[in-house]
Structure formats: structure tokens, C-alpha cells
Amino acid sequence: MQEPMTHVSPPGPRPAPEEVEAEVEAILAGIRADGGRVTAGRRAIVRSLLTAEDHHVTADDLAARVQAEHPDIHRSTVYRTLDALEEMGVIDRITLGSRGAVYHLADHAHHHLVCGRCGAVEEIPAELLAPVLEALADRTAFALDRPRVAITGLCPACRAAG
Ligand SMILES: [Zn+2]
Ligand SMILES: [Zn+2]
């Protein structure tokens, strides 16, 4: 008998600023290694995604967060930068139920449970769905993209509220 909730990792404690900077630098180093340029916009977006409450942020929210610290970075630049980072595989764009499209960093593979009532997101470790996705690829001969699954439902808090 499985205990499903033990496999679900809630957002961890907020990392220390120096840990955030180290992670930002590691991700930017990856961009450079792939021949990409590191711009102020790219740096600001990576940092915003790392420090966001649950690491899943809409394009509008990201633009607002970036502009709060860098008023000189245009909204249109933020949107263009999001497209570029997605193309480079640094971030993923995922549709999370009623929350619509959000972005997360692609550096740790995971899937999502999304509450249809309050919009809460729980991350599911990628290993949990790996056998299912492999079986799917086998049976259909489909070459799957890097999968980013979102399954909707009712979170424990909303269930308790009735
Ligand atoms: Zn995610
Ligand atoms: Zn909920």
C-alpha cells in the first residue's frame, strides 16, 4: 500500500541569498557553455524564478517582478527573453490548470499536481512518472518531448475545507 503524499515534495524553505546567487551563476554558466549570452534580463528572470514563492510564475508576474528591480528592462524584453530561455531549454512553459501558463526552471525535472480550486501546486518527482512515460513511448512509438505533466485535482487543504 502506497502513501502517495510522502512522494510529493512541498516547496522547500526559502534558500539563503548566497545560495540563490550560486544557483543563478550555475544556470548562467550553463547558458554561456552553450554559447548563449548572459544579459541583465536573462539574469533577472533566472533569479526571479529561483526566488518565487513556489517556482512557478506567469509571464505577467515575472515581468512585474523583474521591473520592480530593473525598471530599465522593458516588458517586451522580458517576454522575448522568456521565449529565448525556453528555446535554450533553461526554462519550461507549462499550463497548470486554471492558473494558465507558468514558467519554471528546467534544471530539476518534476511534474505537477494542481489544485483546481485554490491553484496550489505540488511538485511530483520525475522518477514517479518515469515508468509510465517510458511505457507510453514504447507502446505508441512516439518520441516524447521533455515531459512536463500537470494533473489537476483538489489539494488537501481544499478537501478539508469541504
Ligand atoms: Zn514545475
Ligand atoms: Zn486547494
Image (cartoon, rainbow, N blue to C red):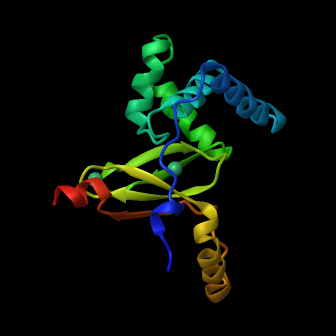
Q: Residue at x 64, y 71 (%)?
A: 130
- Decide: is 100 above or below 130: above
In the image, 36 versus 33, the foreground residue is 33
Q: Position of residue 140 (x, y in %)?
A: 61, 86
156 left or right of 139 in image: left
Classify residue 61 as left or right of residue 41. Answer: left
Work out whether 101 lies above or below 143: above
* Residue 145 visible in the snapshot: no
- Residue depicted at x 26% and y 49%: 118
Quarter assignment of residue 71: top left
Q: Position of residue 58 (x, y in %)?
A: 41, 39
Q: Up-down: is 75 above or below 100?
A: above
Residue furthest left as drawn: 162
Q: Is residue 9 left or right of residue 107?
A: left
Residue 42 in sight from this viewpoint:
yes
* Foreground residue among 146 and 155: 155
Return the residue found at the far bottom: 139
Question: Which image quarter is the C terminus in?
Answer: bottom left
Residue depicted at x 52% and y 30%? 14
How many numbered discs? 0
**Identity of the residue drawn at 57% across and 23% down:** 44
Answer above or below: position of 31 versus 121.
above
How far from the left and from the top, in percent, is residue 66? 48, 21
Counting from the top left corner in percent of width and height, residue 50 is at: 56, 33
